[in-house]
Amino acid sequence: MNQNDKGSKMNASALSEFERLLGDETSPWFEYNLEMASESLSAFVSEDWRGLQSKVLSFSACVQERCAEAVGDFGSNDGVAALTTLLASSPYLDVAAIAASQLDDMEIELPLSLRGKLQQLLDQLMARHSTRAEDVQRLISHLC
């Protein structure tokens, strides 16, 4: 096996390792687990980020939440696409809210095309008196 094959094999497993660390509904999810999952993202290459973005919506609600937390905690612009996918397309309110909060923490400017989705999310969060509504409000005010 040459060096390139070895690197590809290692990178191919980075996404699998991240998914393993996210666990499932029966797995514990404490600060330590979040840190481990977030740190594992440092092994990602652009292929892994694209892979994550393409499969993130196939995760269960619980794993989507964990994914949004870990990617946001990692804080790299490489994760913006996955977070934006969760924000724009996840059918779960809590997932979209977490993704919005993470994007707000990262001070990401989102495209104007997300205004409708963000406004809908804001209305739902305000109805629930969620503290995440403020994050969504800030995102709306910084649309580009």
Image (spheres, rainbow, N blue to C red):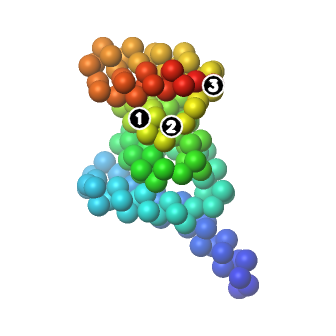
Three-letter code, disc 2: Glu
Three-letter code, disc 1: Ser
Q: Is residue 112 above or below residue 29?
A: above
In the picture, the quarter occupied by the N terminus is: bottom right
Provide the residue designation for mark 1.
101
Mark 1 lies on a secondary structure that is helix
Provide the residue designation for mark 3.
144
Provide the residue designation for mark 2.
107
Q: Is residue 115 above or below residue 47?
A: above
Asked where in the image residue 99 lies, by quadrant, the reply is: top left
Upstream in sequence: badge 2 or badge 3 = 2
Residue 65, image x, y percentages = 38, 42
Mark 3 lies on a secondary structure that is loop
Residue 22, image x, y percentages = 39, 55
Upstream in sequence: badge 2 or badge 1 = 1
Q: Residue at x 46, y 35 (%)?
A: 104
